[in-house]
Amino acid sequence: MPYQLAWFIWTLPVFAFLAITLVLRPFFNHRPHWSAYATITAIGAAFVLSIWALITVLQSPDHLLAVPRIEWAVIDGFTIHLGLLVDSLTAIMLVVVTGVSLLVQIYSQGYMHGDPGYPRYFAWMALFTANMLGLVMADSLLFMYVFWEGVGLCSYLLIGFWFHKKSAADAAKKAFLVTRLGDFGFLAGILTLYFSQNTFDIEALRTAAAAGAIAGTTLTLAAIGIFAGAAGKSAQFPLHTWLPDAMEGPTPVSSLIHAATMVAAGVFLVARMFPVFAYSETALNVVAGIGAFTAIFAASMGLVANDIKRVMAYSTISQLGYMMLALGAGGLAAYASGGSLPIEEAISLGVAVGMFHLFNHAFFKCLLFLGCGSVNHATGTFDMRYMGGLRKYMPFTTLTFVIASLSLAGIWPLSGFWSKDEILVTSWNYIPVWFYVALVTVFMTAFYCFRAVFLTFSGEYRGGEPGAHVAAHSTPGHEQSHMPHESPRVMLVPMGVLAVLSIVSGWINLSGGFSSFLGHSAESEGGWLQTLFGVFTHPLPFISLATAAAGIFLAFAMYNRKWVSATAVGRAFSPIYKVLYNKYWMDELYQGILVKSFLLNGLFRGAQEMDADVVDGVANGIGNTVVGFGKGMRRMETGQLQGYAVAIAVGLVAIMLGLYFWT
Amino acid sequence: MNLWLLAPELSLFFTAVVVLLLGLASSRRGIVIGVSLLGVLVSFVFAAFLWSGTPQATFNGMLSVDQFAVFFKFIVLAALVLVILASADYDYKVEQVRAEYFTLILISAVGLMLLSSARELITIYVSLEMSSISLYVLAGFLRDRRSSEAGLKYLLLGSVASATLLYGMSFVYGLTGKTELGQIASAIQSLSLSGLLDNPALLLGLVLVAGGFGFKISSFPFQMWVPDVYEGAPTPITGYLSVASKAAGFAAVMRIFYDAFGAPSWLGQNWGLLFAGLSIATMTVGNIVATAQANIKRMMAYSSIAQAGYIMVGLAAVSMGQSVAPAARSALAFFLASYTLTNMGAFVAIIAFSNKTNSDLIVDYSGMGRRAPLLALGLTLCLVSLLGLPPTAGLIAKVYIFNAAVQQGLLWLVIVAVLNTVVSAYYYLRVVKLMWLGNPVSEEPVPSSAALRTALFLACAGILLLGIVPDLLVRLSETAGHSLL
Amino acid sequence: MLTQFGQIALFILVIVLFISALPIAAFIFRLIGLAPHKPTQVKTSTYESGMETVGKSWIQFNVRYYTYALIFVALDVTAILLYTWAVDLKSLGAAGLGVALVFIAILAVGYLYTWKKKFLEWK
Amino acid sequence: MTVGLQHYVVLSAILFSIGLYGTLGRRNAIVVLMGIELMLNAANISLVAFSRYLTPPALTGQVFALFVIVVAAAEAAVALAIIMTIYRNRRTIEVDKIDLMKW
């Protein structure tokens, strides 16, 4: 097939967007489902093309899909090329983005059913997917930045999708402002690189960095600038505050944009520009340090959240921190090994480890959010205190949610285990200090995600919370029944597919295939089956598994024992008399734990609130200062004609004097 | 003396006379608008013929017909088409005097077209006044409190500026004995000055001329009339003022300051520095005050001041290097072309909204995305282009002009301009956000006439076309930039 | 250089002096008693040494005077431009005549317009 | 003492200053307009003087002055018309009262 076909990967969703906004919405508004079909068809076709691109890249010797460039504009010698850079990194991202997006769109048909903004929703989802695909395929930083802002805009629009809710509108604004702070850094980084090398071309910049043409402070500044952009988009400390609030958007949006793809764009960006980072130890330390700190910081906040989506949001931040840590640690390998590991090797190591976790995370985190959506669809709330016992009513959702949680917790042999293990190994080998942080995070992760599992699915149903968190969509056709029910099949099928992927996606690297595809040739330890079990020849996997298991067990003990007490009398840590106080007791105990957790984690919560104030304060402060100036300066316009004439006269004299003294 | 070289202006003037007489004979709106558009088309065809000719001076060097001038004629004609279409639905407010209204617009366009090719002081002054006086009347055309106030302010301040300009011109004439720009240039060079202070009278003359044109292009500190006049004038005229009159002003500045007064390179660098300084002040004042506006016409006025600041970046770039840079001229031409489409498009949408709501307050745009999706989409596109985001012409224009400036070593200026662009996002996107996310004041849809829709469609199509395939216009503007006689 | 700078300095000085001179002079005159301010009823009357006016002097003239005046000024002054043609009548020849005729034709259109709009009728 | 170019230039400067003072300092719109006319005429004087003394055979400056006169007349006509509308609207032509639009 001609390589130009690659263009269609990102233009197809654009066509879907245009078709919806220009044709379907104005003229076929009575057939809202057509817009969903348009988006799904376009993304499905893009998915097929992505698979084709992946296969082609796999087969080509240099792992590159050579798409001829289009000369877009020549402005006095300054040529702007439009080109695609489809290498192994891009090919993986393409498959992940189109695949996850396709599943989420299918799911959304059920979730958004009956919403008045149905066509608008699918239009923006198509636009988002187009921008995201453009972002990963762009061959120049300039165009990448364009799409970068594009996904930011779509994210803003979709967070504020239910704009009549004040909290949603505020969250959208906050997301927009906070990520904008990071984007300034990104832009500064791009410009630094441009003025140093006079090109925006990514491949050229990577080569230049590797050849040492960019070096020293310039390199570090450019790398840190780019990382600032990545940190904004990937919600790294201290720019993470927008992501939990972003959960005000529809849940499929959170799933696709704020868990699986867009937030991973920051990690992708760092991976894409990794040669720029790898030659600056400072930059690598910043990446690894911020990543590790974010991982533990966000996980600790996840411990106390009551809103299931917020738990997942903190989890996402934490996992993204892991990916950053992986990148940084991989890059630092060259420095830590004292030169025995060449920097090129370290680059591919970091990228392979980080991207592998991104790849796995996309599936299981997306699934977790879809599970949240399914639960919300059934109960009308996101508050875990009002859930419970859903296992009985929604067995399929429960099953998939547990699979995804196990994967997230890093339980063998699910996908999360493999990539998390690689991150732990890499950090153990090269920056041990962050290894311990990561290990504590493993414990927290296992705890909070199973806390969510037990609170939501086990025990007795606590009745939902009418009115409070009810998603704005109303479902005509079937009334909100008193008891929760399983979601429609159109929602369950994508979840099933993702559940399978959450189990098996990690296995593709068993024989080092994923890593070597990204240029990192790990020493092969025989066939994949051998590796599947042979991993336990090292002690490290035992440590991480044991830590995760301890976390799960603690969650089980704290949140599930009521259920255990009710059925299995005599459990050691559950006094029998408390069973008699039936469910009211449960709530009180819950309160007690909440208070205790709150006290225990008061520090973290305080930290969260403080930086929410500070970071948002800076963003709003700059805006307010400008507007304040504006309000002051507009007073110069007195409306007095002669005042203006005086300004002209004074201006002339001033110009004259200025020229007089200047020359 | 070849009259064909003047054919675009002559045909347009003839159209104006015909429209005036038609207005005496009949009062059908369609005829007047149709004849006007036909005249514009004829003029456009003549201009297109001139484009392929070789650059030459005519009327004893009073006018130069080069691609640069023709490019600006195209810009004026494009603005003219849009303003005529935009007025078609607006003129319920100017019922009785329809023909005069269009006549005045056409005459002012003739003046602006002449101004863009004038290269002689008398011609410059007369064509400037020809357009200005028509615009004074148009600004006060509605004869209500606001419009008449706008007319008075524009007239009195404009006259002060043109008197200043004239006084400056008299000094230039006195020192050089010539009124033709080329001869002035050689006369100044033969004075063999080593600095501006060697001849303070020249300094005085040049600064007064700069002030007169600074008024026209709304540069700081001569920009204060802009918000009041833009707010009060009939909205199509506001749009027209903000694009056509500004474009021709820039063309004239380009000719005067870099043809006549740019000759020893230190003099050119002085202008470059002056325009760079004024550019910073202009865009900063425009952007910052725009953030605090509640009336959209007033906001667009400050926005147009800020845009003038960006254009002046190109002006500064023209002569900052050792030699005059044609690239900066091309960039300026491209920017003005894109700005013309964009700003006129925005004003067309504003007219369509205010026809229904009878209000220009920004808060009344709340929820317009639901009441009039296509209009809101058009306005969004225009605002996005003004801000300079893809995939619009505004982005290309900014890249073009900033690139030219960077190549002339004006990186600091470009950084200030980019920071300003960031500030401008606040007020442009505020409107966009309000339109799409705000709650509608009422659920009543906003209808718009076919003429307004056509105008908006033309503008938006142009914006997108230039944004996606800019090569078309880049080639033209490069030819224009290199052709200056 | 110095002489030219002297010119400009003189020039600016004159501007400044002149703008400030009038009010300052008036003020100083009053201060030193050259212009004593002793109003009497007769002195403040509108026509100190003439006939008392009958009725208000702010009578409204008919707006027709005004339009007439404007039309007169516009057409009259515009005709000055014909003067430049008249000065060099011979050498300009037929082409000059043609241009002058076009010019007059344009003025005629304006005249026709005012006529047709009934600005020339006194009603 | 012979009257030379200097005198005309100074005269025109004085006239320009008076005009500027009228424009900036007086409140009546008509007087402001008269100030502007004075400024234009100051330019005329200097144009004619330069033409007479510096480029004697060529009449460029004087022709320029003719054009300025015509333009000034047109401007005055339009200005009076606009001032009339203002007066009809608000019964005053004091320019400092005409500040409906500001900020």
Image: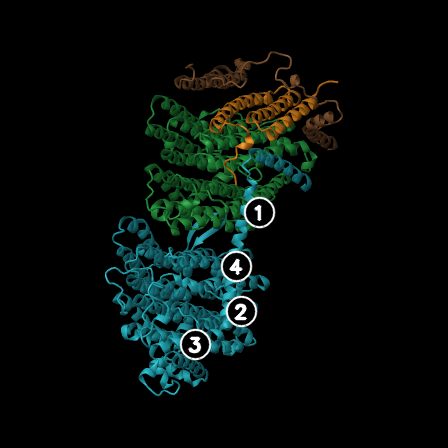
Chain colours: A cyan, B green, C brown, D orange
Disc 4 residue type (three-letter): Gly
Q: Residue furthest front?
A: C41
Q: Which residue is mark 2?
A: A284
**In the image, residue A80 lies at what x, y percent?**
46, 52
Mark 3 to mark 4: distance in Å? Answer: 34 Å
Q: Which mark is on residue A484? A: none
Q: Which residue is mark 4?
A: A617
Q: Residue A444 versus residue A308: which sits nearer the camera?
A: A308
Q: Chain of mark 3?
A: A
Residue drawn at point x = 36 percent, y = 85 percent: A577
Q: Chain of mark 1?
A: B
SS under mark 3:
helix
In this rendering, the label closer to the viewer, 4 or 2: 4
Mark 1 to mark 2: distance in Å? Answer: 36 Å
**In the image, residue A363 lies at what x, y percent?**
36, 70
Q: Which residue is mark 1?
A: B408
Disc 3 residue type (three-letter): Gly
Q: Which mark is on residue A592? A: 3
Tell if the residue under mark 3 belongs to the same chain as the one under mark 4. yes
Of mark 3 and mark 4, the one earlier in the sequence is 3
Disc 1 residue type (three-letter): Gln
Tell if the residue under mark 1 belongs to the same chain as the one under mark 2. no
Q: Residue A537 versus residue A368: which sits nearer the camera?
A: A368
In this rendering, the label closer to the viewer, 1 or 2: 2
Of mark 2 and mark 3, the one earlier in the sequence is 2
**In the image, residue B143 lies at what x, y percent?**
44, 29
Which quadrant would residue A546 be assigned to in this image? bottom left
Mark 1 to mark 3: distance in Å? Answer: 69 Å
Circle 4: is it few (<14), some (14-19), or many (20+) Cα within 10 Å?
some
